[in-house]
Image (cartoon, grey):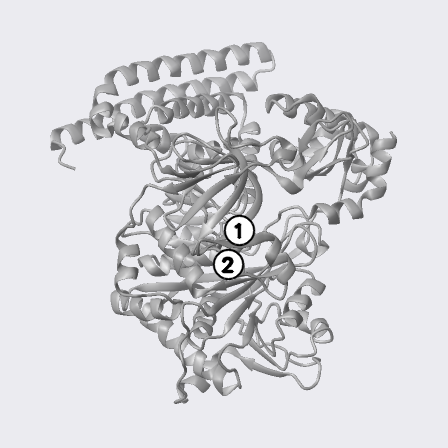
Amino acid sequence: MGKPHCAVFFKSSFSLLLPAVVLGKFVARLGGRLGTYKGNSEISEMDCGFWVTGAISAIKALSYVYDLLTFPVYLILQRPWEKRKASRRPKAKLVAKSEGSVTYRSVDQPKAIHVALEREKIDTLDKMLMWLVKIHGNKRCLGTRQILADEDELQPNGRIFKKYKMGHYKWKSYIDVERLAASFSRGLQELGMTVRKNIVIFAETRAEWMIAAHACFKLNLSVVTIYATLGDDAIAHGINETEVDTVITSHELLPKFKRLLEKTPEVKNIVYMEDQLKQTDITGFKEGVKFVPFSDVIKKGNSSSITHKPPTSEDTAIIMYTSGSTGVPKGVVLSHKNMMATLKAFCDAIEIKPDDVLLGFLPLAHVFELLAESVCLLTGVPIGYSSPLTMIDSSSKIMRGSKGDASVLHPTCLTAVPLILDRISKGINEKVKKSGAFRQALFHFAYEYKLKWIKRGYETPLFDKLIFGAARQVLGGKVRLILSGGAPLSPDTHTQIKVCLCVTVTQGYGLTETTSCATVMDLYDRSTGRVGAPSTVCDIRLDNWEEAGYRVTDTPFPRGEILIGGDNVSAGYYKLPNKTKDDFFTQDGRRWFKTGDIGEIHPDGSIKIIDRKKDLVKLQLGEYVSLGKVEAELKTCPVVENICVYGDAHKAYTVALVVPNPQKLEEMAAEHGITGKSLEELCSDARIEKAILQELVEQAKKCNLQRFEVPGAVKLCAEQWSPDMGLVTAAFKLKRKAVQERYQHEINRMYAS
């Protein structure tokens, strides 16, 4: 803004055209030469290595000249000192201090949307949608990709997979969404639903989920959310505990109720979202249960004149069943007040641009996705729905030669959990590793080059275009922002995603009990490994945890258990008064939640999660080991798909249960001369166990783990841990106790050996 046109032209022309032409010709010529040498059996690997080294040295020399020539222009146009200063700015201040605790509060002021919500007295989700219709009207709101047909596709291995022939996105405007929600609300009343009753939404992420939820908010129903990936017992527990008689589900999940209805005697009505292609089969179900298509409920509402009493801010909006890393799922009671508080905080933290589009695919039954999508509604960002089966061109349901959802939608924003980003990071590493010596060397040079300049506050448009452009295209080519939540993101993954996908990764911290809100990384924060400073609607307090030696007087950073206080904190757990009393309390009119997470607070007010109470074990010789921390570090090892570290208080070392990456496992077996064995056979081979243990030891050294933190033995698990098995939550967090119980025999064997 305000820059001379000649300077802009000089920068874009010189920095993109001249070096690209010179570098492109040089690399093409050299690549051809290397190809010739590789085809010549008389040329040794040493010669090839020599040429690769020479090529990279020449490219480095070119980049050095390029840096010298363009540095003044980049300095003037990109103003890196401003970015560095913004990154270092204070983000929170100390507001209370005692011998055993410190409390911090955001220094930021509410932004425009937050102020408007306060001014207009928008304190419920029902009022919010009505207000948004006035503001955004016919603007795109919710989009669904059309499935035109499904066909059987023969795979190279002879198997036949069902694939989709897909069309474009069809959009509903804000007016459409509000009208459909109002009709669905009246239709539910015609089915007998009354104010303040509970109703379950058990469905995949899609436009109908959001419409159904807002219909329930209008009627002042409490929406009970249950993950679609939970096992039957956990689903039945949520339905029975909340005493619902009506469940909203989908065509795909309806068959589950042939089993579930025997365990849920109170259910009398099932509303199902129809499939785009197939007729839903409702035969063979328990007698006495009424099945109603989603569209029929809307039709009933269209012809109904029933009125309803809207909710107040203190009414319950959601009873969200956390998948729970221990025991059965717990229902967290979230009011409209809680939801609106988080929406205000998120709107203060995130910069929205006029052309933004969100790709929605994480479970809406997860509070993080529900609030992220609600922020999009609030800020006028259209949401295009997707699923892992259709997201990218290579997804399992996309017909060969067809485009995935991201390639059609071209999203600019998406939400993710660390597990997904870890897998993307590993995928990048695998692709680079298989790309040949020259491409590997070129990638590593480009990666280090870009990282160096990013740390100094610069952007690298040439390298983004030439080296990292292909990676960006996988998600449609326009993604600029990835919001990560659900668990801490490792610094290595955070950095690699930022560099290779050319995006901003904003990490936050929150729990279902705090309506997904506690801290959010600042827009200009260039650090990794931290979860940001307190949001604008809550305070963060650290309390001493004497048992493990975490104190607020520690240097260089205060450390302790994280407590969160504010309007975003839940009233408690549904029908669990004792558990609510243990974890929640009210002080000076403010609601607080004890997270069990251990954090340290940095001078700028940002927080780093360093431990968790439940993950801490004390070994035989008195050393404390944070199992979660060790797992987070070892999970970055390429051969590890998932890992659970176990520590026995009567032993001097830990052991590890590892779900290996099948492809890496086969490669490792081949390196040891082991071929022709199944996955199960490889996992039980002592030689492979020993090799993977050595990989973990090497990874532990890279991550600077202490000797006593490194597993002394390993057991390979051939089965993938899934929510259905009850070994991980729907957000793929370990259910440590369940894993321990399932593999107790193997744990005993590892310690005995």
Q: Residue 520 occupies which quadrant of the picture?
A: top left
Task: Identify the residue shown where x is 39% and y is 78%.
Answer: 182
The x, y position of residue 384, in whole percent, is: 41, 59
Spot occupied by residue 335 in the image (x, y as percentages of width and height): 47, 64
Q: Nearer the viewer, residue 597 or 634?
A: 597
- Residue placed at 81% from the left, 32% from the top? 650
**Tag 1: Cα neighbours inside 10 Å, few (<14), some, or many (≥20)?**
many
Query: In the image, which disc is placed on residue 100?
Result: none
- Please give the residue where the numbered disc 1 appears in the rendered image: 593
The residue positioned 88% from the left and 31% from the top of the image is: 752
Q: Is residue 731 left or right of residue 258?
A: left
The part of the image, by quadrant, that contains residue 703 is top right
Indicate the position of residue 459 as horizontal and vertical percent values: 32, 29
- Residue 93 placement: quadrant: top left
Task: Give the CA separation, mark 2 to mark 1.
Answer: 8 Å
Q: Secondary structure at mark 1?
A: strand
Which amino acid type corresponds to the residue marked 2 in the rendered image?
Ser
Circle 2/circle 1 CB separation < 8 Å: yes
Q: Is residue 142 left or right of residue 684?
A: left
In this view, 253 is above or below 631: below
Q: How many marks?
A: 2
Residue 280 vs residue 321, the one in the foreground: 321
* Residue 475 visible in the current orientation: no
Q: Which residue is mark 2?
A: 570
Return the residue nearer the eye: 237 or 393: 237
Left or right: residue 34 compared with residue 287 = left
The residue tagged with tag 2: helix, strand or loop?
Answer: loop
Sooner in the amino-acid sequence: mark 2 or mark 1? 2
Label 1 amino acid?
Phe
For label 2, the crowd category at 10 Å Cα-Cα, with few meaning under 14, some 14 to 19 and many 20 or more, is many
